[in-house]
Amino acid sequence: MGRYVIIATRKPQAERDDGTTTVGALTQFFHTAGWEVTFMVNAPSMYDAYKTGCQDIKPDDYVIFCHDDIEILMTPKQFNSLIHTKLSKPKAGFLGVAGSAYITSKINWYMCSQEYESGGGVVYHGPSVADMTPSHYGHVKNAVGMDGVFLAAKGAVINSIQLKQPDKITSPWDHYDFFYTAQAHIKGYSNEIIPLPLRHESGGRYPPAYQENVPIMAELFEKHLPLRIKTHHK
């Protein structure tokens, strides 16, 4: 079993190697925890970064997709124990730190979580631990769609879904997280929001292309929307 972290980035090599930077410290954390880190530098899209990075993934491998501006706020030993425990569950899908148990044609997990009180998870935002503030999304533990700031899954799940950017999607950096986690849910896997504390330096900003692609992504899943966890009734 291999353990792999795939990170799309535009950060230069010097910054990635510098342990005093956020991305450098993240690299060191994963290396200490025994994970192999692959940076997909200047990839044309998030979809392409993950598809290319997963070409040789085997079913029993553990795979993490995450942003390059996060700090994991637990020890490597605690982190590995959490990930192993959760991915060892039968039918484990994606693990994440935030998501929604109910998603409509709006596609956006956060908007749906607020409107339908279907959210779960917490993420700290800020430039440093001393200056970060928590964003609480709710108490839901399982999700149909999750935030892409951190996602983990076994190779069997990764290999069962389409990683390639859908032909009609024109926003290369948006909606990939919903596209991946929703597919896993539809295939019968259980996506779980886990108690993984992390700091995210940047907040959520939606470019015009994000909104333009919402109806396109919704059309791809129109036979399944709204997506819901059976225990979450709306």
Image: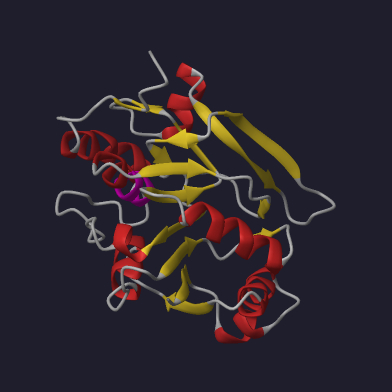
The answer to whether any part of residue 192 appears in the image is yes
Residue 4 vertical position relative to residue 219 in the rendered view, above or below: below
Q: Quadrant of the N terminus?
A: bottom left
Residue found 51% across the figure and 29% down from its top: 119
Q: In the rendered image of this protein, does residue 42 appear above or below residue 106? A: below
Q: Is residue 150 shown left or right of residue 47? A: right
Q: Quadrant of the C terminus?
A: top left
The quadrant where residue 230 appears:
top left
Residue farthest to the right?
130
Magenta-colored stretch includes residue 215: no
Residue appearing at x 15%, y 49% in the figure: 168
Task: Identify which residue, 117 or 173, lies in the foreground.
Answer: 117
Colour convention: secondary structure
Dominant secondary structure of the residues highlighted in magenta in the image? helix
- Could you tell me if residue 206 is visible in this image? no
- Residue furthest top as drawn: 234
Q: Which residues are magenta?
A: 176-181
Where residue 223 appears, x then y in whole percent?
14, 30
Q: Is residue 178 magenta?
A: yes
Q: Estimate the x, y position of residue 214 in percent, counting from the top left.
A: 29, 36
Residue 26 vertical position relative to residue 137 in the rendered view, above or below:
below
Q: Residue at horizontal 48%, vertical 32%? A: 110
Would you say 198 lies left or right of 115 here? Answer: right
Give me the residue at 69% from left, 82% from top.
18
Q: Tally the marks.
A: 0
Q: Quadrant of residue 217?
A: top left
- Say above or below: 199 vs 11: above
The x, y position of residue 194, in whole percent, is 57, 45
